[in-house]
Image (spheres, rainbow, N blue to C red):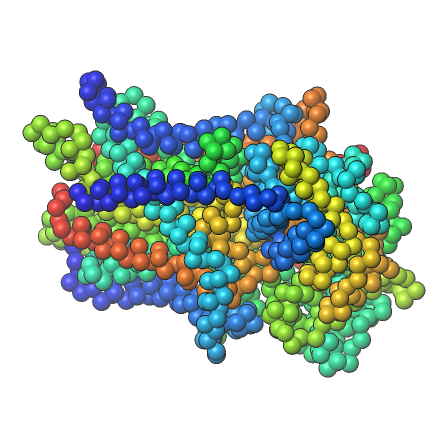
């Protein structure tokens, strides 16, 4: 690389990198050492245990089961949110670029609004709607004689996590819609016209003409969903408590981390050292998968040109 | 690619919009009820409108004071994020250099960090910088943490647009700064809008760092004011909901304003394949 | 591009306002010494105003800066500030493990030589503030657990508060027959289930048994404890339908009780304000879980809510002196009385009387004085307080410290117990397994 371009690259990168390194990377790296100590979160680090926290999480009888169950729930949550994003995020974006732009804008505003509401309030609202005895949704289902659908949503070991995935999607779908709309607008009209001229159906056109063009964006959203699914915490914590009920059916790394580090409402905490090790493991999983997704994404955008 | 008969599209869009809007309207209607009304009859329209909820929430939640603090924090961090992250994204997306992917992944990694983990080292760092109880500390943290998502999104966006225009400009003898300023920035404006909006919202609603880094009650942000109505055992919904409605309005205006910018750019058709 | 200039403009403005703000931060001090107090109880703000007034009248020129932090964030905010070396001078601490962890880290000042503790006679209450023989906090509130009932519904079906367990079950049966939910419960709020079970345990285990438990002479697999679990399980037949899925909004049981949807609720005295907020016209009565036979004693379950502690690392000696004055005052009857008058809660300090405007608290206080379970066996008991990592154990035990207290142990098993996925015996074994560290 030329000297001049190197200088340019450094100038462009420096502000962001410096800021990020000082206030995110440095605190993160310096907190990793907690994971090597038996440490309850208060005071100096004294009891060095090496990698015992890690082996305890991964292999011990008492903890490994909880850890792997949480990892599985995070994966499951990712699959659920991908399904919801594909159907509603991409689907609605596809519809939005087909209608008048001035109207489309208002729909986008509407879909985005829930992102502004704090999770506590969203959670309370849906908790009231889903209350199994007098809540709005069970009442409507009763009135429509859909008794089979009237399940104890948040209290069912099978349905609790999907229910929370739907609530999360309700609150957060605005962002993927925005991103997909931006990508879809970039799809050149001529390509679509050409496909139509060849007699391809709408569905066919979408799958074999439009989708390949927006594939990089789709992978971007996949990465964001993956990171988001592994960071899932707020709604589960608020609606199912620190014990991530019913019977740990919604326990994810986030709730396990919180329970281990801070306890909560009278429950005793187990230790910040152990919890940090847990967070580091979760972080490693997310980074490994994200690295693969990022590679795929890069290849997909390279394929376009 | 407008459809010829968009009726079905409209129907589906309206249906989904209703699913979003009805609970939100319910939220607004609840904000005018007294507490027994909120917990006892959550879905009915208010029988009597309690405007006093709003007055009490405004004064008890100290929203006036907090709105100013929050506006400073949000606007500044969004400005910093947009400027710095678009520059970094340009470098990462368009130049091949050693560590390119690593830096990119490093930024992405920030999305996966549990913030509680980094709280203590950050606190100590801010103490050493003598920034505790100063809004600048919160601005720095928000700007730094917002960098992750923004760089990630912008790199992807820049990569997805062809290099032709830039290349011809460079061949014509334009400098990189000129290319960035005149070509890249206008090109990525739609994504910048998304980035700005999202960071604005998260700075606006952020609760944890103001609580940790600021201690003078006068320096708090609106989220602290809104959520102060949540007690250990009981929540004063009749005050929480009106304060929430008040606090949501600025974000909504920002969105409507930003989305206008966004659409205008898209339709201008300046950049197409 | 115009946008860029705007950005720069904003940046400039902010730089300036940042300068202004930091200037604000350094002002202060007008002769008086400022003592900072942090709490999770926002309702205590008027109390601290009174403390300041009382100290000023005494001649101490002290200004108290009270800051309340939302309960769910309090612990992590306090922990960050204390670890970062900039904690408050005086702070509310959770009783038991919370206080002990900070004490073990040398972050709290031992108060035995500063504060006169003779006003606090309940030994069990003080223990929740002690670590290795020293006292690190002044307990400020006692919470009690009772069964609250809707007196109008009881009157309507001609029911009396029960004398025996059989009476209690009979009341439930009558109510259920008339289509009234006898008892409200929240399956999703495990902490509330555990507190409810502790109510049953208080009556069915009795002081003799809990003393043996604390002394490690018996453990949680003892038939007496299994029997208490079985009694709790029996009640689940009289909970509202789908109780397993109730509780994601946090206080459904208080709301439904307040609205008359259920006749009784097992709850803490701390929830009475919540219930009364939801329905001002409700008439509430209270009773304790009745024993098997009328000759036996029913007991009230209680726990120390928290302690008020003092920072061990106050750099300014003048502030340290002022904070000592404050913490001394917190242990006086005058403080206890103000606390009780303002909050309507029970103070552990001797000589405090509860104002008649809180009749349920007056009754709870009387029960607490005459028939409290002692020692406690659930929340805030020694079994609920795993030893913290001591600061100066250079050797350490070199192993992972993964212990849960009894209160967490109960939360893990109670829902499966109530839904009959677990037998009382199995639940007792699980509890014992979790707290086995205590019996070693």
Q: Position of residue C68 (x, y in %)?
A: 58, 51
Query: The N terminus of chain A appears in which quarter of the rendering?
Result: top left
Q: Is residue C113 above or below residue B60?
A: above
Q: In percent of the image, x 26 and y 43: which residue is there?
A: C9
Q: In percent of the image, x 14 and y 44: which residue is there?
A: B271
Which of the 4 quarters of the picture holds residue C43? bottom right
Q: Is residue B64 above or below residue C113?
A: below
- The front one of C11 and B173 is C11
Q: Where is residue A225 in the image (x, y as percent from the top left)?
A: 39, 44
Q: In percent of the image, x 62 and y 33: which residue is there?
A: C315
- The front one of C292 and B99 is B99
Query: The C terminus of chain A appears in which quarter of the rendering?
Result: top left
Q: Position of residue B233 (x, y in %)?
A: 62, 58
Q: Going by the picture, which residue comes out furthest to the right?
A: C295
Total labels: the figure holds 0
Q: In percent of the image, x 55 and y 63: which residue is there?
A: B236
């Amino acid at each position: 690389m030329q000297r001049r371009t190197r200088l340019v690259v450094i100038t462009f990168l420096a502000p962001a990198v410096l800021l990020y390194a000082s206030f995110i990377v440095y605190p993160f790296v310096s907190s990793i050492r907690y994971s090597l100590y038996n440490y309850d979160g208060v005071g100096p680090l004294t009891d060095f245990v090496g990698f015992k926290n890690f082996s305890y999480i991964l292999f011990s009888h008492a903890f490994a089961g909880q850890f792997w169950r949480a990892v599985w729930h995070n994966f499951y949550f990712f699959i659920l949110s991908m399904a919801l994003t594909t159907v509603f995020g991409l689907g609605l974006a596809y519809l939005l670029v087909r209608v008048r732009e001035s109207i489309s804008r208002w729909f986008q505003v509407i879909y985005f609004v829930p992102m502004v509401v704090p999770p506590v309030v969203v959670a309370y609202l849906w908790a009231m709607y889903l209350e199994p005895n007098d809540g709005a949704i069970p009442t409507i289902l009763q009135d429509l004689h859909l008794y089979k659908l009237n399940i104890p949503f948040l209290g069912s070991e099978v349905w609790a996590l999907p229910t929370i995935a739907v609530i999360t999607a309700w609150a957060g779908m605005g962002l993927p819609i925005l991103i997909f709309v931006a990508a879809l607008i970039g799809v050149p009209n001529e390509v679509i016209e050409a496909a139509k001229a060849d007699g391809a159906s709408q569905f066919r056109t979408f799958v074999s003409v439009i989708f390949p063009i927006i594939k990089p964006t789709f992978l971007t959203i996949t990465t964001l969903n993956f990171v988001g699914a592994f960071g899932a915490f707020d709604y589960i914590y608020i609606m199912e408590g620190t014990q991530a009920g019913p019977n740990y059916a919604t326990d994810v790394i986030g709730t396990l981390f919180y329970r281990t580090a801070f306890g909560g409402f009278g429950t005793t905490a187990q230790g910040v050292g152990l919890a940090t090790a847990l967070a580091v493991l979760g972080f490693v999983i997310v980074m490994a998968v994200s690295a693969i997704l990022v590679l795929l994404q890069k290849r997909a955008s390279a394929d376009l040109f | 690619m407008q459809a010829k008969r968009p009726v079905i599209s409209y129907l589906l869009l309206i249906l989904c919009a209703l699913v979003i809007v009805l609970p939100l309207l319910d939220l607004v209607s609840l904000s005018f009820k007294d507490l027994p009304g909120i917990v006892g009859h959550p879905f009915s329209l208010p029988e009597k409108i309690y405007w006093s909820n709003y007055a009490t929430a405004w004064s008890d939640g100290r929203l006036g004071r907090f709105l100013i603090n929050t506006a400073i924090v949000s606007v500044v961090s969004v400005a910093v994020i947009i400027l710095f992250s678009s520059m970094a994204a340009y470098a990462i997306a368009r130049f091949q250099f050693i560590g390119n992917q690593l830096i990119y992944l490093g930024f992405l990694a920030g999305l996966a960090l549990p913030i509680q983990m980094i709280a203590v080292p950050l606190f100590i760092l801010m103490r050493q910088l003598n920034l505790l109880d100063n809004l600048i500390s919160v601005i720095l943290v928000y700007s730094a943490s917002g960098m992750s998502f923004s760089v990630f999104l912008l790199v992807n966006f820049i990569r997805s647009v062809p290099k032709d225009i830039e290349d011809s400009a460079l061949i014509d003898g334009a400098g990189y700064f000129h290319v960035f300023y005149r070509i890249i920035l206008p090109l990525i404006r739609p994504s910048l809008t998304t980035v700005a909006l999202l960071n604005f919202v998260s700075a606006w609603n952020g609760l944890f760092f103001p609580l940790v880094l600021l201690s003078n009650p006068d320096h708090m942000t609106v989220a602290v004011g809104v959520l102060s109505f949540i007690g250990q055992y009981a929540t004063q919904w009749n005050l929480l909901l009106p304060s929430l409605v008040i606090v949501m309005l600025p974000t909504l205006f920002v969105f409507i304003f930003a989305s206008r910018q966004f659409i205008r750019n898209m339709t201008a058709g300046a950049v197409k394949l | 591009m115009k946008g860029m200039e705007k950005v720069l403009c904003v940046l400039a403005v902010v730089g300036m306002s940042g300068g202004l703000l930091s200037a604000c931060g350094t002002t202060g001090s007008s002769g008086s010494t400022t003592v900072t107090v942090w709490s999770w109880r926002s309702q205590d703000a008027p109390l601290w105003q009174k403390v300041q007034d009382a100290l000023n009248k005494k001649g101490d020129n002290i200004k108290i800066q009270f800051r309340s932090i939302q309960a769910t964030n309090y612990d992590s905010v306090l922990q960050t500030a204390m670890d970062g070396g900039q904690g408050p001078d005086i702070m509310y601490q959770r009783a038991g493990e919370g206080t002990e962890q900070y004490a073990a880290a040398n972050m709290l000042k031992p108060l035995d030589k500063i504060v006169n503790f003779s006003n606090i006679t309940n030994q069990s209450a003080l223990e929740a503030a002690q670590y290795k023989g020293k006292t690190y906090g002044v307990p400020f509130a006692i919470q009690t657990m009772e069964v609250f009932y809707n007196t109008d519904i009881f009157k309507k079906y001609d029911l009396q508060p029960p004398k025996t367990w059989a009476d209690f079950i009979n009341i439930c049966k009558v109510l259920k027959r008339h289509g009234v939910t006898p008892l409200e419960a929240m399956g999703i709020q495990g902490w509330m289930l555990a507190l409810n079970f502790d109510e049953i345990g208080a009556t069915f285990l009795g002081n003799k048994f809990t003393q043996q438990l604390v002394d490690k002479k018996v453990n949680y697999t003892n038939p007496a404890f299994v029997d208490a679990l079985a009694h709790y399980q029996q009640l689940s037949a009289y909970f509202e339908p789908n109780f397993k899925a109730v509780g994601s909004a946090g206080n459904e049981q208080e709301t439904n009780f307040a609205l008359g949807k259920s006749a009784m609720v097992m709850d803490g005295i701390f929830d009475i304000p919540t219930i009364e907020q939801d329905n001002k016209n409700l008439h509430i009565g209270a009773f304790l879980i009745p024993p098997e036979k009328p000759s036996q004693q029913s007991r009230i379950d209680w726990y120390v809510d928290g302690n008020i502690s003092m920072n061990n690392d106050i750099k300014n000696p003048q502030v340290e002196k002022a904070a000592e004055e404050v913490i001394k005052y917190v242990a006086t009857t005058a403080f206890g009385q103000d606390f009780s008058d303002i909050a309507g809660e029970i103070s552990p300090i001797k000589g405090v009387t509860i104002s008649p405007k809180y009749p349920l608290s007056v009754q709870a206080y009387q029960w607490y004085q005459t028939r409290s379970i002692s020692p406690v066996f659930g929340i805030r008991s020694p079994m609920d307080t795993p030893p913290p990592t001591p600061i100066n154990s250079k050797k350490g035990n070199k192993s992972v410290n993964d212990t849960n207290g009894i209160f967490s142990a109960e939360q893990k098993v109670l829902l499966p117990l109530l839904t009959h996925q677990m037998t009382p015996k199995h639940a007792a074994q699980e509890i014992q397994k979790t707290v086995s560290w205590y019996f070693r």
